[in-house]
Image (cartoon, rainbow, N blue to C red):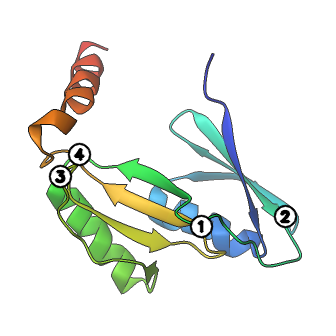
């Protein structure tokens, strides 16, 4: 089985799609007032129009992992300078440095790295790095 797509509702398709393109490196495939289709790392992201405010469950979020603490810090500074709604500052956690921000429409994102994580949380990160090296 292969991961195919994510689909999200939004009351502002254009603003939500622009967040994915401008800040997360997605490619815009299609956009209309009713929907947008984006591509990222082998899967699709669909943004669908809703005529009401979307209410997300508490703590529902998407997590993106970056390779280094510096990369997380650079993204934090970039998003802050662009006026993105920050839900936290950047902080160090036992699972690695991270921060939370919000896209237009209220979708919560966690941007993190395991590069500085406690040893017990590095195993899957190191396995993925080895798999990427072998490819």
Give the mark nearer the N terminus: 4 vs 1.
Answer: 4
- Circle on res. 67: 4
Q: Earlier in the sequence, mark 1 or mark 3?
A: 3
Q: CA distance from mark 3 to mark 4?
A: 16 Å
User: For the residue carrying disc 2, how many other residues have a C-alpha within 10 Å: few (<14), some (14-19), or many (20+)?
Assistant: few
Quarter-of-image position of residue 42: top right
Q: Is residue 48 above or below residue 55?
A: above
Badge number at residue 32: 2
Is label 1 in a helix, a strand or a loop? loop
Pick the residue in front: 61 or 111: 61
Residue drawn at x 31%, y 66% as measured from the top left:
75
Mark 3 and mark 4 lie on one chain; the one further toward the N terminus is 4
Compared with residue 68, is residue 135 higher up or lower down, i.e. above or below? above
Q: Tell me the SS state at disc 3.
A: loop
Q: Secondary structure at mark 2?
A: loop
Residue 73 placement (x, y as % from top left): 21, 67
């Amino acid at each position: 089985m292969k991961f195919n797509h994510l689909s999200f509702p939004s009351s502002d398709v254009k603003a939500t799609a622009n967040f994915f393109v401008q800040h997360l490196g997605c490619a815009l495939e299609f956009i209309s007032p009713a929907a947008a289709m984006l591509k990222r790392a082998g899967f699709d992201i669909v943004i669908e129009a809703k005529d009401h405010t979307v209410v997300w469950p508490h703590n529902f979020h998407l997590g993106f992992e970056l390779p280094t603490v510096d990369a997380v810090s650079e993204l934090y500074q970039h998003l802050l300078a662009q006026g993105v709604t920050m839900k936290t500052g950047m902080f160090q956690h036992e699972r690695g440095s991270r921060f939370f921000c919000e896209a237009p429409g209220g979708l919560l994102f966690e941007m993190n790295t395991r590069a500085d994580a406690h040893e017990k949380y590095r195993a899957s990160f190191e396995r993925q790095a080895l798999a990427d090296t072998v490819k």
